[in-house]
Image: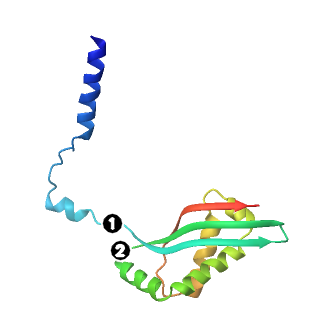
Amino acid sequence: MIRYLLPALLAIACLLVASPARAEPKPADEADAETPEFFGATIGEFFYRDVRPVEGTKLRLSFQLALSVAPESSRQTERVIKQKRHRVRGAVLTAIRLCRIRDFREPGLETLRQRIAAQVHRAVPDLPRGKLLISEFAYFSE
């Protein structure tokens, strides 16, 4: 009896999980109220290799960088990043070169974010200010 009951319960559980939940339609007021609080603009993917003879290490970094800004300035952000992407990339790489090895080991990467933000806003002052988001961060030191 138990051997027939268990497969039946598993089949019912699979059907319940697989069936889409019925969503109630939202009133028009709630649908309009859900505007995004920020807009994320991708700056790019970065791969960096460096030999630092003073520390005696070889450094390899890879990460993706994005900038979150207010929705009102999203068009300006995308336009500036598209027009001045080489200048932005150069500023990011300059900021990486200025960082110490310990800055890449910080749990929140705050020092790296601050240096990148300072260099980017120094190189491209018309880029709207926002929070830098670092994702897929990989750090290798030999």
- Quadrant showing the C terminus: bottom right
State yes or no: discs 2 and 1 in contact (Cβ < 8 Å): yes
- Return the residue nearer the eye: 18 or 26: 18
Helix, strand or loop for disc 1: loop
Residue 36, which numbered label?
A: 1
83 on left or right of 50: left
- Type of amino acid at the residue the image marks with label 2: Pro
- Across and down, in percent, residue 22 comes to 17, 45
Picture layout, residue 82 above or below residue 8: below
Q: Earlier in the sequence, mark 2 or mark 1?
A: 1
Q: Residue at x 66, y 61 (%)?
A: 139
- Across and down, in percent, residue 67 comes to 48, 72
- The residue tagged 2 is 71
Picture layout, residue 18 above or below residue 67: above
- Across and down, in percent, residue 23 comes to 18, 48
Q: Residue at x 65, y 66 (%)?
A: 61
